[in-house]
Amino acid sequence: MAANNAPLLLDATRLVWRRWEGLRPTGIDRICLAWLAHYAPHAQAVIVQRRAKAILPVAASRKLFALLAEDEGTAADRTGFRWRMARLAARHGTDLARSLPGRGRIWLNPGHTGLNTPGLDGWCRATDIKPVYLVHDLIPITHPQFCRAGEAERHHLRMRAMLSTGHGLVANSGHTLETVVDFAGNHGLPMPPAIVAWPGTPELRAVRLAASKAPPTFVVLGTIESRKNHMLLLDVWEQLWKAHGPAAPQLTIIGRRGWACDDVLARLDAGGFGTSVLEAGAVEDADIARLLSGARALLFPSHAEGYGLPLVEALGAGVPVIASDLPVFREIGQAVPDLLPPDDVAGWTSAIVDYAAADSERRAAQMARMQGFSAPDWPSHFARVDAFITQLAAAGGSQVLA
């Protein structure tokens, strides 16, 4: 698939950074790991940092890819990863100081990290590489109110780099691609050839639990940040607790505490929901599957998403979803979930009370619709991306491909 029958180039910048910090994988990290598993056997590593941008030799690439492919990093193994990474850098440090030539090869970058680094466009030209970027979203630009300070400016730089240097773009959804096309048009930037390839869905086998007299449970999954709209659910559960007390449905919040959500964290810490809200924090996949198994529905009230991995994970595991009425959820949900405005507290309360009932017709209707749901899978994703890479290697042009 690479030009001149040489190995592809695969960016490792984001995975190195995340493992170095000992951070539990997010949805983007899981996609980067899937690209690592698929492409690393036939690729050389690329690292993009402010101080160094380099294509690593084959031997150093193999060692780095193997290190990154080990069990996903957590805070507990950060020290071990840093020690092994330091040994690798000691043996191959000079490779970061002098980048190998690109020789017109495809550079796959699935992680966004480093694309706002000064001089990236000049390095791509001088090194002679053809970037193919996976675009996850433009949320820092379209919804800056939900992001860290300065993130909108940084993402502007990333998107400009993708559009000005990109040989091709892979969008994670049709909604994301539409947003990229609008951005390019609004800023007078070229639009590279582009495709849509839904990411694969991790298989969460929901184990059916024995009947219980415990209150019905709902789950919200994802980092706690203002964009995820946990505040709406806290409004709902405050009302439910006041109305039903200990008999109120249970809300389990899965995900680490994030950013731009001080009001949500303060409210969680203050309580006001009795025993009806449980903050589980970041948990392993097996625990996510267990918690979903006992849930009446996954709740996904986000204000904005580029894709929405929890939605397809839940539906793939046979768990109903109540989500915000967003364009991307209409796209990937395949008309299965119940979709509501993300600011409609009364509507969400009504839906949750309905789904909590053992004889809920509304929930039963979604379970029936779910029989027609087709979960995105990695073989289909990579079949589409591989064909795109082959097409790019064979021909140029600037167009949105079917």
Image: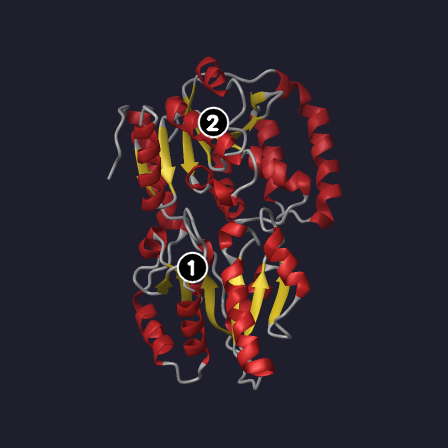
Q: Nearer the viewer, mark 1 or mark 2?
A: 1
Q: Between residue 72 and residue 117, name the one nearer to us.
A: 117
The reply to whether discs 1 and 2 touch (Cβ–Cβ < 8 Å) is: no
Gap in angstroms between the C-alphas marked 1 and 2: 31 Å
Q: Position of residue 352 (x, y in %)?
A: 45, 73
Quickly name the residue at label 2: 157
Quickly name the residue at label 1: 343
* Label number found at residue 109: none
Residue drawn at 60 percent across, 74 percent down: 276
Q: Position of residue 234 (x, y in %)?
A: 55, 65
Is residue 8 visible in the rendered image? The answer is no
Image quadrant of residue 161? Answer: top left
Is residue 174 visible in the rendered image? The answer is yes
Residue drawn at 29 percent across, 31 percent down: 391
Q: Position of residue 150 (x, y in %)?
A: 55, 33
The amino acid at mark 1 is: Asp
Which image quarter is the N terminus in? top left
Q: Position of residue 89 (x, y in %)?
A: 69, 27
The amino acid at mark 2 is: Leu
Q: Between residue 395 and residue 158, name the one nearer to us.
A: 158
User: Is 224 located above or below residue 239 in the figure?
Assistant: above
